[in-house]
Image (cartoon, grey):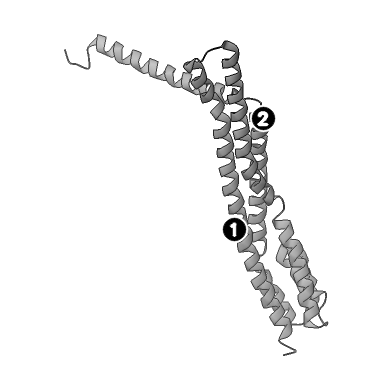
Amino acid sequence: MSFVQNPEIVDTLNQVQQQSVALAQTEELNLLQMMMKGGWIMIPILILFFLGLVIFFERYFTIRKASKQEGGLLGTVKSNVLSGKLDAAMAACRSNNSALSRMLQKGLTRVGRPIKDIEGAIENQGRLEVSRLEKNINILGIIAGIAPMLGFVGTIFGVIQIFREVEIAGGIDIGTVSGGLYVKMIASASGLTIGILAYIGYHILNMMVERLILRIETDAIEFIDLLDEPSA
């Protein structure tokens, strides 16, 4: 009889495997229970978490869409302007509906005026477009600062509660104190984790906006140079 075919050994291995699965399920359940035991402070922390998720993904897809909308708009506008077809250039801007198109459209409406007026109109429109792109991004920065502080507040209140129970009991139970601290530290861990994620998301979105703004500004300058060429 081989070692693997021994029925007693096979039964023992099956029992060990079943116990391992049960232990894993118990640990997972305990983790969920511990999250619920973090205290009332977990409610605002979780609210900040979901708020941060909504803002990040909404801004992320909005900025990506704005980056893709431009296409070959500048080339189309330049060819129409060089051909003297300002109406066609305006129509191309209106149909594109992007930050660059609105800036170019604002400049086209002032063609014939001094180049400084055209440049000023494009810059003013550019400021509005930047504000739209950066909308609500600063909230992620606020979440990155508030979430860890809320976690620490939850832990501090938990420690106060533990020592209050020790005072009432008239003695120190190391098991109770260490167990209570273990549970209350969940608030700090959750707050720090959410703060770190919000901080990363904040900087990712800012980098995306900065790259898009640089590209738009480059195209706007090229457009202004094009309008200034005939008068040069």
Query: Where residue 100 appears, x then y in whole percent?
Result: 71, 66
Query: Quick check: 153 above or below 227?
Result: above
Outermost residue, bottom direction?
232
Image coords of residue 58 (percent x, y): 67, 47
Residue type pointed to by label 1: Met
Q: Which residue is mark 1?
A: 207
Residue drawn at point x = 60 percent, y = 39 percent: 148
Q: Amino acid at mark 2?
A: Ile
Q: Which residue is mark 2?
A: 43
- Above/below status of 153 relative to 80: above
From this viewpoint, is residue 141 visible? yes
Residue 2: where, in percent of width, then height?
17, 15
Q: Nearer the viewer, residue 12 or 142?
A: 142
What whole-number distance in Å separates the C-alpha atoms at marks 2 and 1?
Answer: 31 Å
Camera-near label (2 vs 1) is: 2
Q: In the structure shown, which secondary structural element does the residue marked by tag 2 occupy? A: helix
Return the x and y of residue 165 as percentages of the image width and height.
59, 16
Q: Earlier in the sequence, mark 2 or mark 1?
A: 2
> Which picture quadrant has residue 36?
top right
Would you say 101 lies left or right of 14 here?
Answer: right
Is the C-beta separation of discs 2 and 1 under 8 Å? no
Q: Which quarter of the image is occupied by the C terminus?
A: bottom right
Image position of 204 (left or right of 25): right
Q: Nearer the viewer, residue 158 or 125?
A: 158
Farthest residue, direction left: 1
Q: Dot 2, crowdedness within 10 Å: few (<14), some or many (≥20)?
A: few
